[in-house]
Image: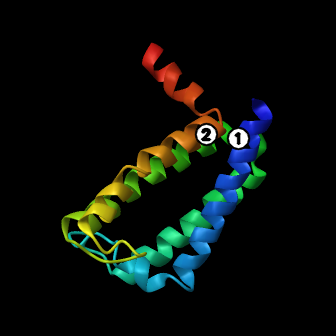
Amino acid sequence: MRYLQRFFQILLGVSLAYAGTTHLTTSRQEFQAQVPTWLPLDADFVVIASGIVEILLGIALLTLWPYRRPVGLIVAIFFILIFAGNINQYVNGIDAFGLDTDQARLTRLFFQPVLVAWALWSTCAWEIVKSWRKA
C-alpha cells in the first residue's frame, strides 16, 4: 500500500508542477476565467501567483519526503481554497477548459473533493486530520 501511495504522491506532484507551469504559459487565459469575479485582485496576478504556488507544491511533493504529511495537508488546503474559482465558473456560466455547459461545470465541482482526498491519502496527511479529531 505504501508504494501505491508514494506513486500517487509522485503523480500528484508532477501534475501540480505541470498545471502550475501552464498557469504561466499556455493556459493563462483559461485560468483567468476561473478567478472569482468577487476577488478584488487582478486576475492575471492571481493566475501567476497560484501557478507559482502550484509549482512549489508539486516540487515539495516530489522532494520533501520527510515532510510529506504536512506538505500533503497544505496541498489539500490549497485545493480547498481554489475551489472558489470552480464555483465561480459554474455560478457565472464561464466557459474555460472545455467546460462550456452548466452540466460540465457542475460535474467539475465534484472532482475537487477527489483532489483533496488524493492529497491527504497519498501523503498520509489524513493521520494529521484524524489526530485533530481526537483532540
Residue at point 75%, 45% (across, down): 7
Between residues 46 and 23, which one lies in front from this camera angle?
A: 23
Q: Is residue 91 above or below residue 71?
A: below
Q: Position of residue 87 (x, y in %)?
A: 28, 59
Q: Position of residue 90 (x, y in %)?
A: 25, 64
Q: Position of residue 59 (x, y in %)?
A: 70, 60
Find the residue positioned furthest to the top. 134
Classed neighbour count for the residue bearing mark 2: other residues with Cα under 10 Å, few (<14), some (14–19), many (≥20): some
Q: Is residue 68 above or below residue 133?
A: below
Between residues 76 and 26, which one lies in front from this camera angle?
A: 26
Residue at point 36%, 71% (across, down): 99
Residue where numbered disc 2 is placed: 70
Disc 2 marks a residue whose amino acid type is Pro
Residue at point 43%, 75% (across, down): 97
Is any part of residue 34 visible from this angle?
yes
| Tag 2 and tag 1, C-beta contact below 8 Å | yes
What is the secondary structure assignment of the residue under circle 1? helix
Residue at point 61%, 62% (across, down): 16
Query: Which label number is shown at residue 113?
Result: none
User: Which image quadrant for residue 22?
Assistant: bottom right
**68 lies left or right of 36:** right
Is any part of residue 45 visible from this angle?
no
